[in-house]
Amino acid sequence: EAKDHGEGGSIVGAPLKGKRVVIIDDVITAGTAIREAIDIIQREGGQLVGIVVALDRMEKMPGTGADDDAAPRPSAIGEVRKQYGVPVLSILTLNDIIAGLTGIGSEEDIRRMEEYRAKYKASD
């Protein structure tokens, strides 16, 4: 949100006009915050060239009702990638975490993560 104190405005730091911009975020759930950031970048004259996400949970986008947990849906990452035509890269995925825990994590934790992945995995 725009600030009315300090430097003011929607961004802090160097102007974006004419600059190539990469968004760095921790995780994308529904894509709302990323879309807001993209709007600000475009409004300020920047050119979005990519997005880096720390963790791709590989989740389908949130549904609209209580009965649609089983319905296939794409991921927010996939939708942002398709909508804006920029690469969306992740540092880690849920698959990476499960693989990394194999042999060192508890069987119960791994099983629960695999169940979570099976239930909420995106269709893309």
Image: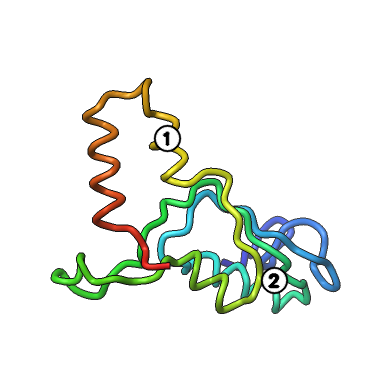
Q: Residue furthest left?
A: 67
Nearer to us in this view, 4 or 47: 47
As drawn, is 41 to the left or to the right of 79?
right
Q: Residue at x 83, y 72 (%)?
A: 17
As drawn, is 32 to the left or to the right of 47?
left
Position of 62 relative to 90 (above/below): below
Q: Residue at x 47, y 58 (%)?
A: 28
As drawn, is 42 to the left or to the right of 61?
right
Q: Residue furthest right?
A: 18
Task: Verify CB contact (< 8 Å) between mark 2 and mark 1.
Answer: no
Position of 107 relative to 78 (above/below): above
Which residue type does callout 1 highlight?
A: Ala
Which residue type does callout 2 highlight?
A: Ile
- x, y (%) of residue 113? 29, 41
Q: Mark 2 — residue?
A: 41
Q: Residue at x 48, y 46 (%)?
A: 93
As helix, strand or loop, the secondary structure at mark 1 comes to helix
Q: Residue 121: which disc?
A: none
**Quadrant location of the C terminus?**
bottom left
Q: Residue 99: which disc?
A: 1
Q: Of the residues tagged 2 and 1, which is closer to the observer?
A: 1
Position of 4 relative to 93 (above/below): below
As helix, strand or loop, the secondary structure at mark 2 comes to helix
**Quadrant location of the N terminus?**
bottom right
Q: Residue at x 33, y 24 (%)?
A: 105
- x, y (%) of residue 108? 21, 30
- x, y (%) of residue 6? 70, 56
> Of the residues under marks 2 and 1, which one precedes in the sequence?
2
Q: Residues within 10 Å of mark 1 (few under 14, many from 20)?
A: few
Q: Tell me how far mark 2 sits from mark 1, CA to CA.
A: 36 Å
- x, y (%) of residue 100? 44, 31
